[in-house]
């Protein structure tokens, strides 16, 4: 997102960023890439029915992320 904003000296509106995200992330396979990353890192697993579940490692990371979210008051 920073690169997109940086590339336009006139700035970007929220709607512009939403469209860029949809066109450049989702349509280019971004979701599948993130799923693959999480599978490889062991944070999620996939069963024979193509259902994804969080692993014990993923649960630990989730707790850390929630803790940091609370500390820094992030949404």
Image (tube, helix red, strand yellow):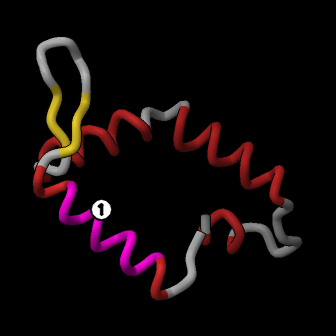
Task: Give me the residue at 43% from left, 33% from top.
Answer: 29
Q: Relative to 52, does residue 65 appear above or below in the rendering?
A: below
Q: Residue furthest bottom?
A: 71
Residue 46 horizontal/vertical position (percent): 17, 28
Q: Relative to 4, does residue 54 appear above or below in the rendering?
A: above
Q: Relative to 61, does residue 52 appear above or below in the rendering?
A: above
Task: Give me the residue at 59% from left, 69% from top.
Answer: 75
Q: Tell me the chief SS of the magenta region.
A: helix
Q: Quadrant of residue 52?
A: top left
Q: Residue beneath label 1, please?
A: 62
Query: SS at mark 1?
Result: helix
Q: Which residues are magenta?
A: 59-69
Q: Quadrant of residue 63?
A: bottom left
Task: Give me the residue at 39% from left, 70% from top.
Answer: 66
Inspect the magenta stretch and tell me whether residue 1 lies in it: no
Q: Is residue 38 left or right of residue 19?
A: left
Q: Is residue 24 left or right of residue 12?
A: left
Residue 35 horizontal/vertical position (percent): 30, 39
Q: Relative to 40, does residue 27 appear above or below in the rendering?
A: above
Q: Quadrant of residue 67?
A: bottom left
Residue 70 horizontal/vertical position (percent): 47, 80
Task: Give me the residue at 34% from left, 45% from top.
Answer: 34
Residue 41 horizontal/vertical position (percent): 13, 52
Q: Is residue 9 left or right of residue 75?
A: right
Number of residue marks: 1
Q: Camera-side residue: 18 or 63? A: 63
Inspect the magenta stretch and tell me whether residue 62 lies in it: yes
Quick one: quadrant of the N terminus?
A: bottom right
Q: Residue furthest top?
A: 49
Crowd band around label 1 with a 10 angstrom C-alpha radius: few (<14), some (14–19), many (20+):
some
């Amino acid at each position: 997102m920073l690169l997109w904003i940086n590339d336009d000296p006139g700035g970007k509106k929220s709607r512009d960023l939403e469209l860029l995200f949809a066109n450049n992330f989702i349509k280019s396979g971004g979701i599948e890439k993130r799923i693959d990353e999480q599978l490889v890192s062991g944070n999620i697993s996939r069963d024979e029915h193509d259902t994804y579940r969080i692993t014990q490692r993923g649960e630990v990371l989730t707790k850390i992320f929630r803790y940091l979210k609370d500390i820094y008051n992030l949404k």
